Image: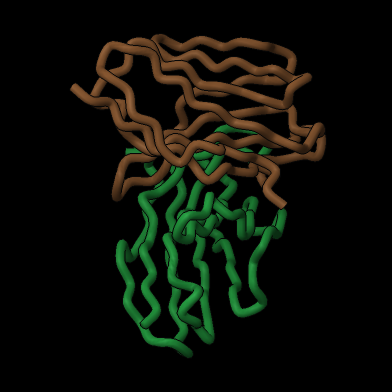
Chain colours: A green, B brown
Amino acid sequence: DSGVTQTPKHLITATGQRVTLRCSPRSGDLSVYWYQQSLDQGLQFLIQYYNGEERAKGNILERFSAQQFPDLHSELNLSSLELGDSALYFCASSVSGLNEKLFFGSGTQLSVL
Amino acid sequence: DQQVKQNSPSLSVQEGRISILNCDYTNSMFDYFLWYKKYPAEGPTFLISISSIKDKNEDGRFTVFLNKSAKHLSLHIVPSQPGDSAVYFCAASSGTQGGSEKLVFGKGTKLTVNP
């Protein structure tokens, strides 16, 4: 158990809909990351937050947004969903976000039908 | 543009033998490398890492070798055990550019260790 909690584990929705994925980092970790893993793809970095502030953006679509709340949990919002958004979404956390290993949650499997 | 490449999607070895997983990178700014292991229905878990100031790091049955001139690293598992069967991801970051947000992953190699 990594200590990172992601909910829900599975999500099935339709095109055009909006969903919210939730992540609770390990106790004491201030930095949260979101990654997307599509079929046959590696883990694609989406966005990083540190102590409530956005620190870095990767290949995140404009239809996607995220935030980190004062209690350090994070939410990833995906809107106007398309079939191609079907993927495994991972959240990870680390203490400071400075060149250190990440601890991953078990992921949310999103299926857009 | 894939900066971290794992050219072998899968690898099969016999229990007790050595498993060698390979990874190539293109970005010469990468200076910190990690291997993650992933079981089905679980998130990746950290396995071992190496800084660019070293060429070898060992942790029990796992050893990572770094060849900076070739921009190549490898993970050796000796002896391999059936419980090692998983997908292995190579990852790299450029710490000088600050932060784990620069962690770039390969597509993974699925290792199967046969009893």
Residue plotted at (48% across, 57% down): A37
Residue B31 falls in image quadrant: top right
* Residue A42 relative to residue A24: left or right: right
Residue plotted at (46% across, 20% down): B20
- Up/down of A55 relative to B13, above or below: below
Label total for image: 0
Residue A49 falls in image quadrant: bottom right
- Up/down of A18 relative to B19, above or below: below
Point out residue B28 in the picture as x, y percentages from the top left corner: 81, 32
- Up/down of B90 relative to A104, above or below: above
Residue A22 falls in image quadrant: bottom left
Point out residue B36 in the picture as x, y percentages from the top left corner: 47, 34
Point out residue A16 in the picture as x, y percentages from the top left corner: 48, 90
* Residue B9 relative to residue A58: left or right: left
* Residue B32 relative to residue B35: left or right: right
Point out residue B73 in the picture as x, y percentages from the top left corner: 62, 23
* Residue B100 relative to residue B114: left or right: right
Along the viewing direction, whichever of B21 and B99 lies nearer the viewer? B21
Residue found at the very far left of the displayed protein: B115
Task: Name the quadrant of the C terminus of chain A.
Answer: bottom left
**Residue B45 seen anywhere in this rendered image of the structure:** no
